[in-house]
Image (cartoon, helix red, strand yellow):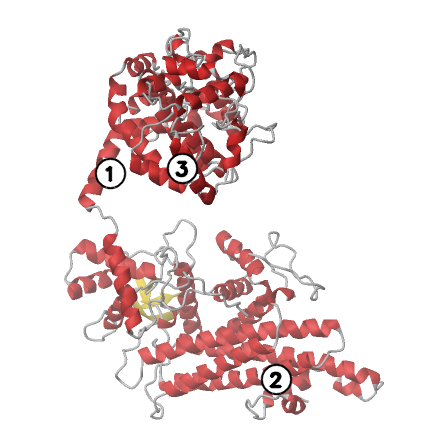
């Protein structure tokens, strides 16, 4: 008994309008006057009538449909492939041969039908019959099907065997010629409906459909209403002219042809052929010196640059010189949010907001008011794609603005000059050894990941960020986070503000009441807090002048951060943790009790707003944070 | 014994006298001759075994009838199609339907009474599943026959049959009334039977295991060697 499945959509076979058309032609072919002349097939000593020659079929199609030769041949071939005509001399070769090869018409029972797919039970019975007839005659793929079906419909297997026996017996009762014809018919049917491996399955139609094409819906008002809605939505879909999309494809293919390792070969050599993994080593994600082809690809378009980790690294170097490194860092952070852990989505979103988006954030990115509004609103209920609008804005900004300059910059040109062009290795010719020894496989993902992290750490160690002030006093073993020249942090960027304008000194002067003393901080832990405090106070005083502000906000490189925590009174350790920093954010394991995730509460956010707006910003508070967190800031 | 079963059968169904199953009962039932000599306590068991035996025999006969029917439907629309063929098909179909209704009653009766042993129960369940499968196949063939008869109606408004290599095409035979309504009735009858069976007995499919070996050689997983085993066996795809 077949278990009827609950209809949850996509259970219907699609329309197959071509079947009816072919059937009409088939029936016309039978006409004794205008149809095809039949011959007799001689099989050993029996004569079986109604055989037709391939050439006759072709001629008939040409004459009846008045189409060119090629089309007629193709159409005739399709007739055979769909199983309306089957070859007699080479049963497995479902093509139309235009010589004297003989074919016969298939009985209508075995015609392909839209309503009824070829049933598994029937196939099982057929295979069992074949097995009974002569043991061991099943092909390999048939044996596989047989075993698979045995497991699949095991509950009716006894029935299958019984029915196979009975059908076999029933067949034996007929006279020999008929039996032969019937066997040929059935075999042809299954060759069409369960194609052997390697043969094209013309009846395959992809997925089942949601709607039943055979359903005769009464045209009620509701049906019309739904149809109208459907068509309106279809019209609203974005469309591209095929000339345009094809043109794009051609352009892409032409541009990337030389880069394709299969079409244009790869240097030094294809590892799968020569067993030499140098190609993989040279093209590792964060290799020291990339290949020339790779660097040239970065100039094709912006997405090539940004999708290549090495390209991103190089671009970030350039951006830091232009003081817009936070853009790329923000973009990377958004990617991490989108593709990272679901459990950490809320925390990450909050951290990103605090670091990049909040007014007064340390690495504030410049996005327009509308986008900011949308983003902040969305952050009340964060999900993976909540920062999409902002990310797109920043992406377009980088693409339209920075990218052009990057390609002309010395950073890029230097990389291009440094890039290596590997020599093509000579293929070692030892054919008899090749088959024996075990070949190397491509590098394991685990090893790749370790290598990436090491490379990242190395890059972080060697680059210097001129705007990073307080790492100087940090007891960390490595010099983190400095890009460009390794100049000592400029006085202007010291939050303890020697050269800062007076409001800052005033602000800083009044920090003593605020918790740990603002003296030299060996651990560097307290300082950021006061920095935050002083920043907050500075801003509270309404000193909003942007140049000072930009120098104030230190620009940390992404990779150097060990454990970043949002501002707002929590301990923040800026110790450069150059151990394996795999993700942008790491949640501190020994977090003090107070550093909990703020509940994103819209009501409390509303309460907060007036206070937040009062003096620009109190601290870097997310609008949805609960008011009690403020008190802990000090 | 068959008549007794029919009386148990609550459904209307056909009450025709079924010569075939009785004949097979006589042949396949080993017990009747020795029944008189056995102790009264064991008569029930023998009757039970007999019930299963009759059901199994009826199932085999049903298979034969459906196989014959299928072969006739195969030739519809082909060169062997003729009124005679269609008449024969109708006869076979009637035969199969009678068999199936009788078998259904028997199985239902057997399942309703508490059978003597769990093996009996399992055997009956197995036969039930086999019967359902046979009915489904039969229904599919009937649907095809209906479709083909409409497409290749012999009245003259249908298409000309195809030259398929089979012989016996004789245009003679008595003038047949249009067969379509009768075919539709047949289909309805079988459908109703199927629906009734599916609703009457709650037999999960996975508890039935094949008793026949796969017979494919080394690659066949050890399937159903021997009789039905105890306990459910989930065959998840």
The percent position of residue A55, horizontal first and vertical second, equals 23, 60
Frontmost residue, B66 versus A203: A203
How far across and how far down the image is residue B35, in percent?
79, 86
Q: Callout 2: few (<14), some (14-19), or many (20+) C-alpha neighbours within 10 Å? A: many
Quick check: B229 left or right of A198? right
Residue extending furthest toward the top: A487
**How far is the residue under mark 3 from the one under mark 2?**
82 Å
Q: Callout 1: helix, strand or loop? A: helix
Residue occupied by mark 2: B105
Q: Is residue A332 left or right of residue A143?
A: left
The tag on residue A249 is 1
Q: Chain of mark 3?
A: A
Image x and y of residue A11, in percent: 42, 63
Q: Is residue A45 something one can see in this rendering?
A: no
Q: Are marks 1 and 3 on the same chain?
A: yes
**Dot 3 corresponds to which residue?**
A610
Q: Between tags 1 and 2, which lies in front? A: 1
Chain of the residue where label 2 is placed in the rendered structure: B
Mark 1 Cα-neighbour bin, 10 Å: few <14, some 14–19, many ≥20 = few
| C-alpha span from label 1 to label 3 | 54 Å
Q: Which chain's residue wears label 1?
A: A
Numbered marks: total? 3
Question: Is A38 situated left or right of B194 in this image?
Answer: left
Which one is closest to the eye, mark 1 or mark 3? 3
């Amino acid at each position: 008994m077949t278990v009827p499945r609950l209809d949850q959509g996509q259970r219907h076979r699609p329309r197959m309008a071509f079947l009816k058309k072919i059937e009409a032609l088939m029936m016309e072919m039978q006409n004794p006057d205008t149809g095809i002349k039949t011959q007799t097939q001689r099989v050993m000593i029996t004569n079986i009538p109604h055989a037709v020659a391939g050439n006759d079929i072709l001629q008939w199609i040409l004459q009846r449909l008045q189409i060119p030769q090629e089309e007629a041949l193709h159409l005739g071939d399709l007739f055979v492939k769909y199983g309306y005509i089957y070859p007699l001399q080479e049963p497995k070769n479902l093509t139309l041969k235009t010589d004297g090869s003989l074919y016969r018409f298939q009985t209508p029972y075995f015609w392909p039908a839209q309503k009824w797919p070829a049933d598994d039970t029937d196939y099982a019975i057929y295979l069992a019959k074949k097995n009974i007839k002569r043991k061991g005659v099943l092909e390999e793929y048939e044996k596989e099907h047989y075993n698979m079906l045995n497991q699949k419909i095991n509950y009716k297997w006894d029935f299958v065997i019984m029915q196979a026996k009975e059908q076999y017996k029933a067949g034996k009762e007929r006279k020999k010629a008929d039996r032969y014809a019937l066997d040929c018919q059935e075999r042809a049917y299954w060759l069409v409906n369960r194609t052997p491996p390697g043969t094209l399955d013309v009846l395959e139609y992809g997925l089942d459909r949601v709607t039943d094409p055979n359903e005769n819906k009464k045209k009620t008002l509701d049906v019309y209403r739904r149809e109208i809605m459907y068509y309106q939505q279809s019209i609203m879909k974005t469309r591209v002219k095929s000339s345009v999309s094809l043109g794009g494809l051609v352009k892409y293919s032409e541009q990337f042809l030389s880069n394709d390792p299969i079409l244009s070969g790869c240097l030094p050599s294809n590892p799968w052929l020569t067993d030499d993994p140098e190609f993989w080593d040279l093209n590792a994600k964060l290799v020291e010196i990339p290949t020339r082809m790779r660097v040239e690809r970065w100039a094709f378009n912006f997405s090539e640059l940004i999708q290549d980790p090495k390209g991103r690294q190089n671009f970030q170097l350039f951006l830091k010189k232009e003081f817009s490194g936070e853009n790329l860092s923000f973009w990377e952070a958004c990617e991490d949010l989108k593709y990272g852990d679901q459990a950490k989505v809320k925390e990450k979103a909050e951290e990103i907001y605090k670091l990049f988006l909040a007014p007064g954030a340390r690495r504030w990115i410049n996005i327009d008011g509308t986008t900011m509004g949308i983003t902040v609103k969305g952050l009340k209920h964060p999900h993976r794609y909540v920062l999409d609008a902002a990310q797109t804005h920043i992406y377009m900004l980088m693409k339209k603005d920075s990218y052009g300059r990057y390609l002309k910059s010395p950073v890029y040109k230097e990389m291009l000059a440094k890039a290596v062009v590997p020599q093509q290795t000579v293929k070692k010719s030892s054919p008899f050894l090749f088959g024996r020894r075990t070949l190397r496989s491509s590098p394991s993902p685990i090893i790749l990941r370790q290598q990436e992290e090491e490379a990242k750490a190395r890059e972080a160690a060697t680059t210097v960020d001129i705007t990073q002030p307080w790492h100087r006093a940090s007891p960390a073993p490595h010099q983190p986070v400095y890009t460009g020249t390794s100049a000592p942090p400029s006085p202007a960027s010291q939050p303890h503000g020697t050269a800062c304008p007076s409001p800052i000194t005033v602000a800083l002067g009044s920090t003593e009441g605020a918790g740990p003393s603002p003296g030299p901080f060996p651990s560097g832990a307290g300082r950021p807090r006061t920095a935050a405090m002083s920043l907050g106070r500075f801003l509270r005083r309404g000193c909003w002048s942007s140049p000072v502000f930009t120098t104030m906000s230190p620009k940390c490189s992404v990779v150097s951060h060990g454990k970043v925590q949002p501002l707002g009174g929590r301990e923040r350790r800026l110790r450069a943790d150059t151990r394996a920093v795999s993700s942008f954010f790491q949640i501190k394991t020994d977090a003090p009790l107070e550093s909990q995730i703020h509940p994103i509460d819209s009501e409390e956010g509303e309460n907060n707003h007036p206070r937040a707006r009062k003096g620009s910003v109190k601290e870097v508070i997310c609008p949805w944070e609960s008011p009690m967190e403020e008190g802990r800031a000090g | 014994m068959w008549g007794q079963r029919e009386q148990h059968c609550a459904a209307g169904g056909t009450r025709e006298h079924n010569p075939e199953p009785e004949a097979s009962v006589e042949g396949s039932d080993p017990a009747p001759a020795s029944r008189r000599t056995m102790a009264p306590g064991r008569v029930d068991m023998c009757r039970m075994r007999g019930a299963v035996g009759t059901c199994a025999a009826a199932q085999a006969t049903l298979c034969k009838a459906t196989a014959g029917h299928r072969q006739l439907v195969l030739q519809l629309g082909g060169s062997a199609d003729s009124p005679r063929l269609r008449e024969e098909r109708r006869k076979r179909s009637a035969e199969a339907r009678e068999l199936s209704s009788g078998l259904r009653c028997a199985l239902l009766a057997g399942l309703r009474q508490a059978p003597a042993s769990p093996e009996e129960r399992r055997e009956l369940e197995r036969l039930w599943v086999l019967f359902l499968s046979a009915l489904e196949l039969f229904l599919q063939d009937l649907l095809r026959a209906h479709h083909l008869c409409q497409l290749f109606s012999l009245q003259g408004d249908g298409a000309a049959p195809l030259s398929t290599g089979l012989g016996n095409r004789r245009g003679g035979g008595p003038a047949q009334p249009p067969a379509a309504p009768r075919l539709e009735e047949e289909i309805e009858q079988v459908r109703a039977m199927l629906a009734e069976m599916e609703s009457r007995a709650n037999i999960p499919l996975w508890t039935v295991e094949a008793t026949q070996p796969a017979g494919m050689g080394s690659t066949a997983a050890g399937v159903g060697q021997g009789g039905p085993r105890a306990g459910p066996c989930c065959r998840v795809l």
